[in-house]
């Protein structure tokens, strides 16, 4: 389940933007669930499968550090990345008894593995899950607009702006227009699968942005944005 405002931090993992302070009771109750003897802490290396589509959905996962992508595979091998998650995000809750997608780490990541029954039978756990679901709905609405109405250039611009700390879902939050640097923790193919594009289109759009001076490649996986507002105007959100 994705929180509403994400960005990519220097470590290449999505960073959650500040959200409203949780009610004290919910926070205390959720902390008690995390401290339960049945809650485990695990670490996984990059590009390791957390769970497969169809696996029993009897656990929830809260990311302590790192990044995870959720995706679905079609019978012919095509893939659609549906969510990108980072520290503080909760995922693994399914409408049924089995997971409806695959969860895979993007970078080396740490998780708290929570017994689903502990979360669903606790009032604090139910409130926490409900808030996460509300945020997930907003994120999915934005992703539906991106896939259904935005051009290839707008999709790539939205994705890159989303990786800048403090900019959520492609919206420019401040007007300081200071240069920003982002790390691409995802491969071109993973970005393409998230944006509903081909890898050739993603590479072409990024190359065009570099030629126009909107992006500067400092390293293969690191981009500098000299004029953030100019890139924001290309997201289609203004």
Image (cartoon, helix red, strand yellow):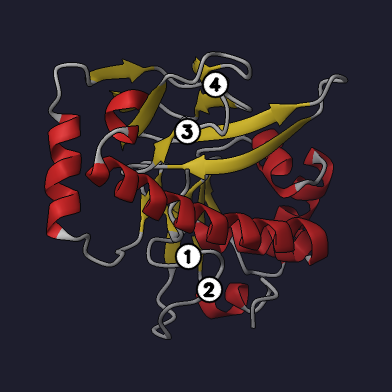
- Residue drawn at (73%, 66%), measured in percent from left and top? 154
Determine whether 136 is above or below 123 in the image.
Answer: below
Q: Nearer the viewer, mark 2 or mark 3?
A: 3
At a point 53% along the width and 31% down the height, the residue shown is 94
Expressed as whole percent of the image width and height from the top left, the position of residue 110 reads 30, 26
Q: What distance separates the C-alpha of mark 1 from that of mark 2?
A: 6 Å
- Residue marked by disc 3: 93
Question: Does the image show residue 210?
Answer: no
What residue does disc 2 label? 171
How far is disc 4 from disc 1 in space, using C-alphas? 32 Å
Query: In the image shown, does 187 or 127 lie closer to the viewer?
Result: 127
Rate crowding at label 4 as few (under 14), some (14 to 19) or many (20 or more) other CA atoms within 10 Å: few
Using the image, tell me which numbered label, if any, was put on residue 97: 4
At a point 40% along the width and 51% down the height, the residue shown is: 130
Assign a secondary structure to mark 2. Answer: loop
In the picture, the quarter occupied by the C terminus is bottom right
Q: Is residue 128 visible?
A: yes
**Is residue 130 placed above or below 86 in the rendered structure?**
below
């Amino acid at each position: 389940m994705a929180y509403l405002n994400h960005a990519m931090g220097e470590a290449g993992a999505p960073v959650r933007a500040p959200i409203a302070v949780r009610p004290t009771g919910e926070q205390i109750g959720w902390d008690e669930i995390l401290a339960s003897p049945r809650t485990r802490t695990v670490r996984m290396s990059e590009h390791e499968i957390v769970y497969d589509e169809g696996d029993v959905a009897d656990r929830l996962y809260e990311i302590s550090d790192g990044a995870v992508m959720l995706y679905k595979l079609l019978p012919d091998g095509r893939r659609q990345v549906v969510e990108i998650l980072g520290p503080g995000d909760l995922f693994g809750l399914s409408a049924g008894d089995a997971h409806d997608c695959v969860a895979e780490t993007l970078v080396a990541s740490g998780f708290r593995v929570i017994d689903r029954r502990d979360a669903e039978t606790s009032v604090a756990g139910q409130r926490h899950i409900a808030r996460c679901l509300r945020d997930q709905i907003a994120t999915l609405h934005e992703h539906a607009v991106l896939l259904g109405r935005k051009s290839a250039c707008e999709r790539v611009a939205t994705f890159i702006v989303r990786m800048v700390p403090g900019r959520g879902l492609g919206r420019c939050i401040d007007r300081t227009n200071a240069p920003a640097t982002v790390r691409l923790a995802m491969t071109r193919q993973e970005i393409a699968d998230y944006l509903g594009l081909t890898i050739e289109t993603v590479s072409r759009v990024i190359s065009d942005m570099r030629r126009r001076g909107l992006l500067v490649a400092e390293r293969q996986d690191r981009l500098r944005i000299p004029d953030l507002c100019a890139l924001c105007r290309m997201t289609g959100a203004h």
